[in-house]
Amino acid sequence: MNIYIAYHFVVNPLQPATDILTAELGYAGFESFVENEDGVSAYIQKQDWHEHILEDVEILTSENYSINYTIEEIEQQNWNREWETNFHPIVVDDKCTVRAPFHEKPDTQFDLIIEPKMSFGTGHHETTHMMIQHLLKNDLKGKVVLDMGCGTAVLAILAEKLGAKKVDAIDIDNWCYLNSLENTERNNCTKISVFEGDASLLGEQFYDVIIANINRNILLDDMATYVSCLNPNGMVFLSGFYREDIPAITEKTEELGLSLVDTLEKNKWVALKLKN
Ligand SMILES: C[S@@+](CC[C@H](N)C(=O)[O-])C[C@H]1O[C@@H](n2cnc3c(N)ncnc32)[C@H](O)[C@@H]1O
């Protein structure tokens, strides 16, 4: 049984502070977040925790917001109960529902059943929501797809349902890897292979479509490797960063021969579509 450290943050005023806090905690190493009416709870495995974990989270010292927190040590199982009571289905553009197995079957064109447990990717986060919107707008029929940083594999599952002929889903986190295996099976997917690791696994396979919802720094570090395995006329969908990060991201992607063709934005988060 994994032990997690939970930080329950009470944030005032809520926005944009909660979004900024969540992004900074992500950079600091926290792996899952549950927003609530007071702020956000952030989770990190005890083995990854250290006493200086909040040292670089700058918003905590900002005079513009009041942010207080309590800390709790919890077992994974308790967290599961928490998300079950808090997880409501979401519908994207009237076409795609993301729901848990215990929710009723919806009448949207796409029905993704996700049991996220500790993995990011229920569609509730702005970045996942926008990546789903991008995928719904594009033709994935017969395409070979990479979902890097797959979380729950929600985007990989949608890619298969949109007609992709082969999908590789990769996540660096063991829990996400296992959860992605479960979710792909739960959705009767047959085209998805799940791997535990990062960009160092790439090189053998070339892709028509690359999806990466991770964060600014990892995308900047690993972009050249991603692009090195992109087929001509390929599409790249990127998220996990803010509007103000777009210049840094596009400077790198332009260097690598990609051009920006579509930008979605929600609560300051963005999701980009690029082509080579
Ligand atoms: C923001 S979540 C996105 C999850 C899902 N794709 C979605 O859109 O909801 C980012 C995921 O990237 C994974 N990750 C972080 N660093 C990574 C890396 N260097 N390579 C691959 N995956 C990584 C994390 O474990 C996490 O599951």
Image (cartoon, helix red, strand yellow):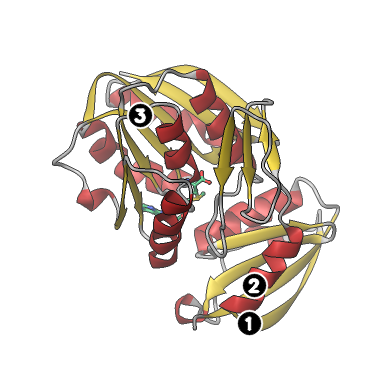
Q: CA separation, marks 2 and 1?
A: 7 Å
Secondary-structure class at tag 3? loop
Amino acid type assigned to the residue bearing label 1 in the image:
Ile
Against 49, residue 13 (above or below) is above
Percent x, y of residue 29: 50, 65
**Label for residue 225?**
none
Against 5, residue 117 (above or below) is above
Give the residue displayed 70% in from the left and 36% down from the top. 267
Q: Badge 2: few (under 14), some or many (20 or more) residues near its Cα, within 10 Å?
A: some
Amino acid type assigned to the residue bearing label 2 in the image:
Trp
**Residue to which mark 3 is pinned:** 164
Amino acid type assigned to the residue bearing label 3 in the image:
Ala
Q: Tell me if 70 is positioned left or right of 170 in this view.
A: right
Q: Nearer the viewer, mark 3 or mark 2?
A: 3
Secondary-structure class at tag 1? strand
Percent x, y of residue 79: 64, 72
**Residue to which mark 2 is pinned:** 79
